[in-house]
Amino acid sequence: MDESSQEKIQAADNQSLERSGRAFIAVWCRAQEQVAGHVPPSQLRALEIVAAHPGISMRELADDLQAMPSSASRLCDRLEAAGLLARVPVRTDRRQVSLRLTPAGDRLIRDLNRQRRRDLDAVLERMTPQERERLGQGLAAFAERARPPDPC
């Protein structure tokens, strides 16, 4: 295969990946707008991190958000005021706090995940079993190759 043919194949692959990425993001964001439209994306991301890591520290949250600790703290102030997040003093060091979802925050994340799953299932139901199998294989291969190498 000559270089021109390889470039055309690569361009078609890139277009397909971009189109697929936009479609996935649209489905993902539609659920976010339906369930959590009142919560800005940065705050929702923080809630999702805390949901995945209950008891996370403010510093760890800031690292995960790639934000300054002061910015993460202000974000948590807003989430706390909205009744979605609680700061809990660490027993061994009262200067430290761990972050946890409130029942309302937990309900919001569960509802969001449930809606995302419903929306994705609706798309998958319109695909043939063969298309779903190829999609699964392709996504698994993509995830494997996109994963950063182990540092050690």
Image (tube, grey):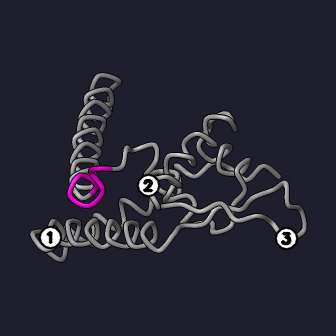
Q: CA distance from mark 1 to mark 2?
A: 32 Å
Return the residue at label 3: 91
Of labels 2 and 3, earlier in sequence is: 2
Q: Main structural element of the magenta stretch: helix, strand or loop?
A: helix
What residue is shown at x 45% (from left), y 71% (from top)? 106
Q: Secondary structure at mark 1?
A: helix
The residue identified by callout 1 is: 122
Is the residue 5 above or below the residue 103 in the image?
above
Q: Mark 3, residues whose alpha carbon is within 10 Å: few (<14), some, or many (≥20)?
A: few
Of the residues under marks 1 and 3, which one precedes in the sequence?
A: 3
Badge nearest the viewer, 1 or 3: 3
Measuring from the top left, give residue 23's x and y in whole percent: 21, 48
Q: Pointer 1 and pointer 2: residues touching (CB < 8 Å)? A: no
Q: Residue furthest right?
A: 92
Question: Callout 1, which amino acid?
Answer: Ala
On whether residue 114 falls in the magenta region, the answer is: no
- Which amino acid, by three-letter code, is at mark 2? Ala
Image point 27% across, 29% down: which residue?
A: 5
Based on the displayed image, in which of its 4 quarters is residue 54 positioned?
A: bottom right
**Farthest top residue in view:** 4
**Among the 4 quarters of the image, the one containing residue 135:** bottom left
Q: Residue furthest bottom?
A: 129
How many marks are shown on the rendered structure? 3
The residue identified by callout 2 is: 82
